[in-house]
Amino acid sequence: MPVISLKEVTSANRESILRLKLAEVQHQFIASNARTLGQAAEAPEAWLRAIYADDVLVGLLLLHDEHLREPPREIGYYFLWRMMIDIHHQGNGYGKQAIDLVIKYVSTRPHAKRLLSSYLPGEGGPEGFYLHYGFTPTGNKIGEDIEIEIPLVKNLALD
């Protein structure tokens, strides 16, 4: 099984990131990688990472980490804004392992008690993936998206 890692997006991997593909049905559920790169460039709270399986680029993720902003507007706000795995690499467990790494990262951040995300419901969407991983609906909506969360296991005495 390849080792999954999250690496910085640089000029060396940017063009390859733009060539990653989704299944046709998935385009309605996630913005393009070009849009993700643009949004990350404009957001001081963006933690953008390329997902690698060993040395092979397989996906992209964008995390909102409010503590990257100075000063943070909201204490302990962490939101998995976007994640995609290339169509040729889906079904290999890379998405799950990438979220494992995001949770590991967020668990080291200030005031981190939960990781939020959202999904647009519909046939071919990511709902099953997130719910199977362990996210649960919060009861809130973000536009048409269903907000979900997963609690973080950590030593809360350190917070």
Image (spheres, rainbow, N blue to C red):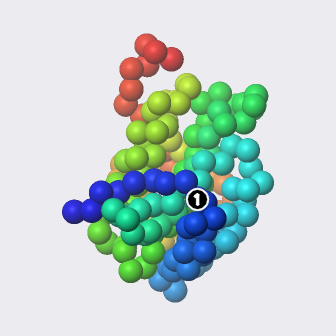
For this orientation, the residue located farthest to the left is 1
For this orientation, the residue located farthest to the bottom is 24
In this orientation, which residue lies closer to the viewer: 49 or 97? 49
Q: Position of residue 157 (x, y in %)?
A: 43, 13
- Vertical side of 136 occupied by 15: above or below: below
From the viewer's perspective, is 18 left or right of 96? right
Amino acid carrying label 1: it is: Val
- Vertical side of 97 occupied by 21: above or below: below
Residue at 69%, 56% in the rendered image: 40
In the rendered image, which residue does mark 1 sit on? 9
Residue at 31%, 72% in the rendered image: 91
Please identify the quarter of the rendering in which residue 152 is found: top left
Q: Tell me if residue 89 can be seen.
A: yes
Please identify the quarter of the rendering in which residue 42 is found: bottom right
SS of the residue at dot 1? loop
| Crowd band around label 1 with a 10 angstrom C-alpha radius: few (<14), some (14–19), many (20+) | some
Residue at 76%, 28% in the rendered image: 71
From the viewer's perspective, is 104 left or right of 28? left
Q: Quadrant of the N terminus?
A: bottom left
From the viewer's perspective, is 132 left or right of 140? left
Q: Position of residue 83 (x, y in %)?
A: 52, 61
For this orientation, the residue located farthest to the top is 157
Residue at 29%, 69% in the rendered image: 92
Q: Position of residue 4 (x, y in %)?
A: 35, 57
Q: Position of residue 15 (x, y in %)?
A: 60, 74
